[in-house]
Image (tube, helix red, strand yellow):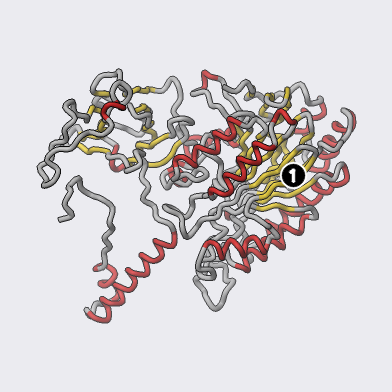
Amino acid sequence: SSSSSSSRQTSTSSSLSAGAADRSTFSSAQDWLDSAVQDREESGGFDESSFLVGILGDLHMDPRKMEDYEEGRKHWVPILQRGKEAHGNVAVVSLGDLGESKNCDHNEANPTELFAGTTVCHELASEFLSSFGVPYEVIGGNHDLEGIDEFRTDAQNLQLFLEQHGKPTPQFCREIADKTLLVGLCSTIFREAPYTSHEVIIDEAQIDWFEDLLEQHPANGGWKIFVFTHAPPNGSGLRVLQENHVVNGCCWLNHSNEGQCRRFIELVRKHRSIKAWFSGHFHLGQDYQDSITFPTIPREEGPYPNRGSCVFAQTSVMRSGTSRDGRQQSRLLRGNADGFEICTVDHQKGGKIRLDATITYRDDSHEVGVYMHDDDAYDHDKYFKVYTPTEGDQQFYCGADTDEECPITEDEPVTMDTKVWWRLSNGRVLGVMNGMLLEYDSSTLAPLGLVLSKEELLGRAIAVVDSGIEDCLVQDEEDGMEGADCPDMESLSGEEREQAVLVHDLEQGSITVVQPNEDGSYWRKIVRNKIARMKERRREQAAIQYGMERLWLDEKDAKQSVVSTWGPYTTTSGNAL
């Protein structure tokens, strides 16, 4: 377990001076910067360990709507200039999703082409990011390879991305100050995504590179590493959108690949040199306290998370039309050998700077973190906040030593207020919140995806029952399946039981068996990537045209007559007929 500590209070930590605590009273960024510089000079001045980084969330640039970007740059340039004058260790990091995923009247020859991922998109983004007067780094998000009409493959689109931004590789590593690294990992898969194209996928070569970098820069060697990715890793504890990213399986890095998805938090737990991890993707503001999470939380608040020595921070957006909660904000990271501060640059308030959290290093592997403001967005909790299983909620362990039946809802119908979670014998975790059945990661308890929707669950009860057999013989009437050995019964004995999750209608008496996926997970991995869906729509359009030309249907009737069929299993039968 981690011995780092955190606090959810608004007072300052002992490492900050009184001047720093009073910075919340400043109405202008200039006054805030003057005070911050004065504090630093009075406590020993700047040195080779001092640094300042401007962090920009999802830009989604639209060449027709440049006003907010120009205003945001005006806010940032003086801040970055002060850093250059003070110590020179300054950079900007863009968290990806550089272009708008719509047609932006940018290509007269193709009026339906999406702007994101095109050559003209990355040219515009490169020009903008180069205009801040300091070096910039950028990593790709889930929209940055979306130039599907211009490039046939992800590799071709990625090459354009790298060339336009002067990147030798998708990932980056910049030593911003003495023994302080900025490290970025880039999403490199769009057309070839196994499921939704909105999943942020870091390829295996980058993950291996990242792990090797961490091995070579250990905490006990004095290294401090700040990581940047478009989406956060599973286990970060950041606020996510249940109705969007959770149900579609695109919350976390490599979300649909269970092993890779969990690998990032495992690296965080192992390597205490990782001090902070910044991400965007959700288009949510920075006024929620859970837009920043510390390495630990008090045990009484829920399952004790092991986040190593890492602080996770969500980053908002710059343009008004891209915000989900009305906020327009960026992150400011500044620090030195003693610790660092995470701040908000508020683009709706003239670039006003707010200190959000201060982290003080106790030694190479331990730190003290303090929130520096109250949760300014409390009223939005019910709409945005996703339920995470916590101690104190109704919970069940349906394990090998429990009864043969776990009556999850005690024969009571699920309502919108039902809040319950349970762990199956095989370790899988399921839970009910907002009338939906979700699956959660067995280690971090982070939400993974939708199992049953409200329409399928409300008014029904849930139970878990044994489904295994005692004589290790599968009875099946189908030819060739008269009997089959149970391959893993010995390994399951005493440790894991075969179980069935049942949802039953209390009035009609119907029972739904919630079948797991072939990999053992339960959440629905059914959203195909954008290329697959585009081809499906084109096939349907061809069918409509066929109906009009060959069957003499008018357009309306032709559209209504066309249906599609897909291949996923819909029966337990071993015969396709």
Residue 265 location, quadrant = top right
Of residues 478 and 504, the one nearer the viewer is 478
Query: Can you say whether 357 is above or below 346 in the image?
Result: above
Residue located 62% across and 43% down the image: 210
Residue 542 lies in what quarter of the image?
bottom left
Which residue is depicted at the point 68% across and 57% down?
168
Position of 88 relative to 553 (above/below): above
Number of numbered markers: 1
The residue where tag 1 is placed is 53
The correct choice, above or below, for 197 with respect to 303 in the image is: below
The residue shown at (62%, 20%) is 3
Per the image, label 1 sits on a secondary structure element best described as strand
Quadrant position of the C terminus in the picture: bottom left
Seen in the image, is 508 located left or right of residue 211?
A: left
Image quadrant containing the N terminus = top right
Q: Residue at x 59, y 30 (%)?
A: 270
Residue 283 visible (yes or no): no
- Camera-side residue of 384 and 520: 520
